[in-house]
Amino acid sequence: MLIVKIVPGENIERALKRYRNKVRNTQQLKRIRNNEEFTKKSIVKRVQLAKAVYRSEYFKKMEE
């Protein structure tokens, strides 16, 4: 649960902006969306492997 303390005299719009930034930075929405449906461990590993391959190829191209 995220808590945003409001300073006396602070604009509510500013507090909402701090709340949105906190949600974005903690990736809370991403975790909630991932929990909507079950994904098998093999699929999770496959996606992680694909990301690792992509990153390694990307960095190899950057070095050239």
Image: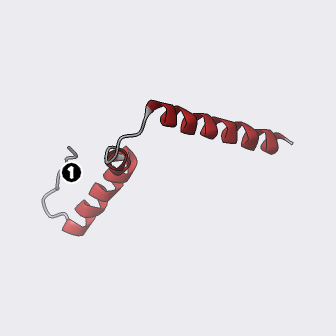
What x and y, as percent, mark residue 11? 20, 67
Residue at 27% over, 56% down = 19
Question: In the depicted view, which residue is nearer to us: 17 or 6?
Answer: 17
Residue at 33% over, 47% down = 28
Quadrant of the image occupied by residue 21: bottom left
Residue occupying the far right of the picture: 64
Q: State the scheme by which the image is colored.
A: secondary structure
SS at circle 1: loop
Residue at 24% over, 68% down = 13
Horizontally, is 45 left or right of 53 in the view?
Answer: left
**Amino acid at the residue labelled 1:** Val
Horizontally, is 45 left or right of 11 in the view?
Answer: right
Horizontally, is 41 left or right of 8 in the view?
Answer: right
Question: In the depicted view, which residue is nearer to us: 49 or 16?
Answer: 49
What x and y, as percent, mark residue 36? 31, 48
For the image, the number of numbered tags is 1
**Residue 11 visible somewhere in the drawing:** no
**Label 1 Cα neighbours within 10 Å, binned few <14 / some 14-19 / many ≥20:** few
Residue occupying the far left of the picture: 8
Question: In the depicted view, which residue is nearer to us: 6 or 58?
Answer: 58
Residue at 37% over, 45% down = 34
Horizontally, is 44 left or right of 25 in the view?
Answer: right
The residue where tag 1 is placed is: 4
**Residue 31 visible somewhere in the drawing:** yes
What x and y, as percent, mark residue 55? 67, 40
From the image, which quarter does the N terminus lie in? Answer: top left
What x and y, as percent, mark residue 14? 26, 64
